Image: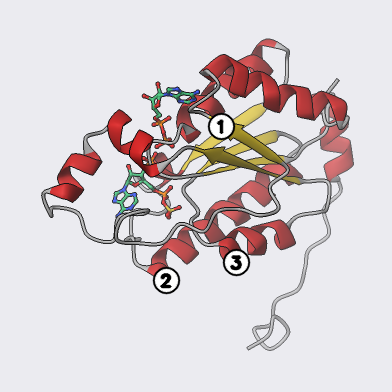
Amino acid sequence: MNQEEKNLTWQRVSVSKEMREKLHGHKSFVLWFTGLSGSGKSTVASEIEGMLYKRGFSTMLLDGDNVRHGLNHDLSFSEKDRRENIRRLGEVSKLFVESGIIVLVAAISPIAADRQAVRNMLGADEFIEVYVDCSLSECEKRDPKGLYKKVRKGLIANFTGISDPYEVPVNAEIVIPTESMDIRECADRVIEYLIINQFIS
Ligand SMILES: Nc1ncnc2c1ncn2[C@@H]1O[C@H](COP(=O)(O)OS(=O)(=O)O)[C@@H](OP(=O)(O)O)[C@H]1O
Ligand SMILES: Nc1ncnc2c1ncn2[C@@H]1O[C@H](COP(=O)(O)OP(=O)(O)O)[C@@H](O)[C@H]1O
């Protein structure tokens, strides 16, 4: 059923995205961090949010883990639910972009088509994919939440990179190798990209 058949219309609003951006004093866009569990998505995204905050930017960090405690608490880690998780994170990001702020999303988002669907939801200059590149063996060595240990004991099924797929991005705007660069260097690489490409000044 399309929107017309559902008797839905798009309501016009008096304040535009551009007006909200002007109020905040900067552009709004999404930095989308994808990578294996333990690759460093949350750590680097949080470091970057701190750096942006200190420079006076309005930001919102959506961490997949955290959003699964609320909005997405009904979703499992099946293929279908992961897709729905990413779709909702994308839609929420789009609302925050409309509100004029910078959104950072840290979610495994393992399937390329699901990430592409979010890219398609947003404008060409509103979505920046950041591949948090780290080998499975290093992620497992870090194991910050003890999840890999549980997986090896057979306590978690469908775990990304082990018993569930992770499709490595082929068109990410930024790649941060967290095995060979420290947290600050990774964050600096992203900030540098934003400055060079005039997302921030
Ligand atoms: N089966 C399975 N596979 C992967 N991850 C699992 C799983 N079960 C629980 N967790 C924990 O959930 C976090 C991933 O949630 P996401 O919303 O980012 O996942 S996804 O994008 O929908 O794939 C993930 O967080 P990160 O480690 O920060 O990536 C884990 O803490
Ligand atoms: N360059 C780096 N970037 C990000 N995290 C790193 C880096 N080097 C080591 N780490 C460590 O790796 C772990 C990554 O965990 P986390 O950020 O929760 O990953 P994810 O959100 O991808 O699951 C943290 O313990 C962090 O201190």
**Left or right relative to 84: residue 199:** right
Residue at point 52%, 62% (across, down): 111
| Above-or-below relation of 125 to 50 | below
Mark 3, Cα crowd under 10 Å, few <14 / some 14-19 / many 20+, is few
Task: Decide which of tag 3 and tag 2 comes sooner along the chain.
Answer: 2
The reply to whether residue 143 is in sight is no
Q: Amino acid at mark 2?
A: Lys
| Above-or-below relation of 97 to 191 | below
**Left or right relative to 82: residue 174:** right
Q: Which residue is mark 2?
A: 80
Residue nearer the viewer, 11 or 57: 57
Q: Nearer the viewer, mark 1 or mark 3?
A: 1
Local SS, label 1: strand
* Colour option used: secondary structure
Q: Which mark is residue 177?
A: 1
| Alpha carbon separation for disc pair 3 and 2 | 12 Å
Q: Amino acid at mark 1?
A: Pro
